[in-house]
Amino acid sequence: MKRTPEQQVLFALLSGNIQEIPEDFNADRFWRLLKRHKLQQLSEKILPLVSDEVQKGYKEELRHWGAMSLLFFQELKNVNALLQKSDIQMVVLKGPVLSYQVYHTFHHRYYSDLDILIHPGQLEKAALLLQEAGYVAPDGSSPSSIIQREDHLEYNNDFVVRNPATGIVLEIHVGIYVAELLDREGERAFMQSASDIEISGHQFRVFSSEFNLVYICFHAAKHMFFRILWLSDIDGYIREVAHDPERVIGLARELKMDKMLFISLALVRTYFQTPLPEEYRRFLSRHRHPVLLWCARGILLGPGILVYESGDVNQAKKGKEKGIDQVKPVHYFWQLLFLVLLRRGIIRQARFLFYQFRKRILR
């Protein structure tokens, strides 16, 4: 697929080889591209190459996010203290903690909410505490009322609440299980690996180093490597966080996530020139998933919308209304084929295809 001028600049920035801006480069389109991939911080690297007016807009956005990232971290500290006080163990997923682990700052990584994981048995207690602290559901109802709906947690591993005082959204996960990608036994292994780390004098519970790397590869694959941010996280994690590559590979095999690890490593090697340890290089040399890689690259370069993840076939129209490039048949094909091939075994692949057919054609 031919790259747009904005994509050319973006991938040059990722590889550290940006020398000039193409004549047909559009600053507004580039900013939309950065927002799609949550890589706004990269705009700092091209400030000397753009006009004063564009510089001013980029700098204002970056200053705003710098302030917001501190608010997010403060919110996370408050929630952590609130739940710990009542002996509710929570694991922090991604967000400011991952940003600090990988980039050593809270503002380098962009996020729009806070994600935490708690044990299902502590859900009601946690919901009541958050309710007493002023949190509300998106529809204005109480957190407790969400989990009392019989069908909500039957179909969802999470629910969302918002702090009206700050506007910050908190996504509370009671599991990371995804049908046919991660089973319940694997989910328990992630939960049991969690341990405490200290950030700015505060203790936060996270997955162990090896489990955390496998998790961010799993998260990226689950969402079809739609955002380059997730590849940036994987690249930074390999470079900055101490971990045992052999243990990561072993976990990926045990959890049946070796395809996800392969695609993750192959993509960061291509787009970030990540200096992979020898163990990862051997792992890549022993695996071949060319069609999956082809699909992932097509999704990265495609329009800023995930058709199959949303479950809404009208998402393409909505995306176009928001200024997102039109979704073409080939984009549907890349995304569907990727999700099919990501599953292990012909039976699982056929079952997923039938589910998509029933949901979109027979409904």
Image (tube, rainbow, N blue to C red):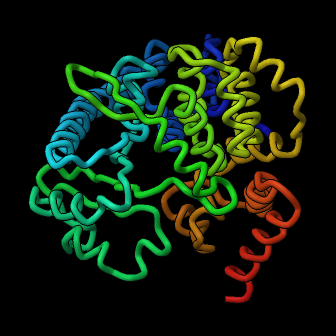
Quadrant location of residue 133?
A: bottom left
Q: Is residue 288 above or below residue 87?
A: above
Q: Position of residue 71 (x, y in %)?
A: 20, 36
Q: Residue at x 31, y 72 (%)?
A: 147
Task: Name the residue nearer the viewer: 197 or 105.
Answer: 197
Q: Position of residue 22 (x, y in %)?
A: 64, 24
Task: Name the residue nearer the viewer: 19 or 337.
Answer: 337
Q: Position of residue 253 (x, y in %)?
A: 74, 38
Quadrant location of residue 72?
A: top left
Task: Name the residue nearer the viewer: 29 or 282.
Answer: 282
Q: Is residue 292 above or below residue 317?
A: above
* Residue 57 visible from this viewpoint: no
**Residue 172 falls left or right of residue 165:** right
Q: Residue at x 9, y 61 (%)?
A: 132
Q: Position of residue 199 (x, y in %)?
A: 28, 22
Q: Residue at x 85, y 58 (%)?
A: 345
